[in-house]
């Protein structure tokens, strides 16, 4: 689940950092895979709000399909219903496999860990604190501090691989 962002400045900072964080995370995953006996692939998924029933998922999916070809006068009603029901957001997983072992890693969660201070998926999942951007990743000119961002991305990706289960 994406972090809670409570103001436009933090939102703009997150927009500045997320794409570079994603690029660096993917790059460092590739480097780790080269040195690892794990095989990696990527998977697009839809992530639904916690507690979404299968019935609601079916209705939302149908409304999203209707929205693509809906007449302009019907769009407002469809949007209102979708906002009430809750919509999925796109997820992107790294799927790791070694022999019979399989591990899925949420790539957006890794990017959130890079971009935000003390980001915890569990805190976020259970309505925890509002996200606080790691402003040390932004230099004095307001641009991405690439060396700091890269160092943080390396550390987070290395931690993922260090925490993989041992070979059975």
Image: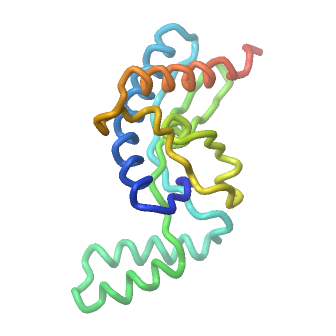
70 to the left or right of 92: left
Looking at the image, which residue is at 36% across and 28% down? 145
Above or below, 158 relative to 74: above
Q: Quadrant of residue 130?
A: bottom right
Q: Quadrant of the N terminus?
A: bottom right
Colour setting: rainbow
Viewer-closest of 150 and 139: 139
How many numbered circles are shown? 0
Looking at the image, which residue is at 26% across and 82% down? 70
Looking at the image, which residue is at 23% across and 86% down? 71
Kindly give the residue lying farthest to the bottom in the view shown: 73
x, y percent for residue 123: 70, 51
x, y percent for residue 81: 46, 84
Kindly give the residue lying farthest to the right in the view shown: 168
x, y percent for residue 45: 48, 50
Viewer-closest of 3 and 70: 3
Kindly give the residue lying farthest to the top in the view shown: 35
112 to the left or right of 99: left
Q: Quadrant of the C terminus?
A: top right
Above or below, 130 relative to 93: below
53 to the left or right of 3: right
Q: Quadrant of residue 147?
A: top left
Viewer-closest of 40 and 122: 122
Looking at the image, which residue is at 74% across and 15% down? 166
Q: Quadrant of residue 85?
A: bottom right
Kindly give the residue lying farthest to the front in the view shown: 140
x, y percent for residue 124: 64, 53
């Amino acid at each position: 689940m994406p972090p809670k962002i409570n103001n436009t400045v933090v939102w703009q900072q997150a927009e500045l950092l997320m794409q570079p964080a994603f690029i660096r995370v993917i790059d460092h995953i590739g480097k780790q895979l080269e040195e690892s006996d794990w095989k990696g692939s990527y998977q697009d998924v839809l992530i639904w709000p916690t507690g979404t029933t299968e019935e609601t998922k079916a209705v939302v999916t149908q409304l999203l399909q209707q929205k693509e070809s809906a007449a302009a006068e019907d769009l407002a009603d469809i949007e209102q219903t979708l906002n009430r029901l809750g919509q999925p957001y796109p997820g992107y997983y790294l799927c790791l496999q070694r022999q019979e072992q399989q591990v899925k890693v949420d790539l957006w969660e890794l990017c959130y860990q890079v971009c935000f201070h003390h980001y915890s998926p569990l805190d976020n999942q259970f309505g925890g604190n509002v996200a606080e951007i790691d402003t040390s990743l932004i230099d004095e000119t307001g641009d991405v501090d690439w060396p700091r961002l890269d160092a943080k991305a390396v550390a987070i990706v290395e931690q993922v691989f260090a925490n993989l289960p041992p070979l059975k």
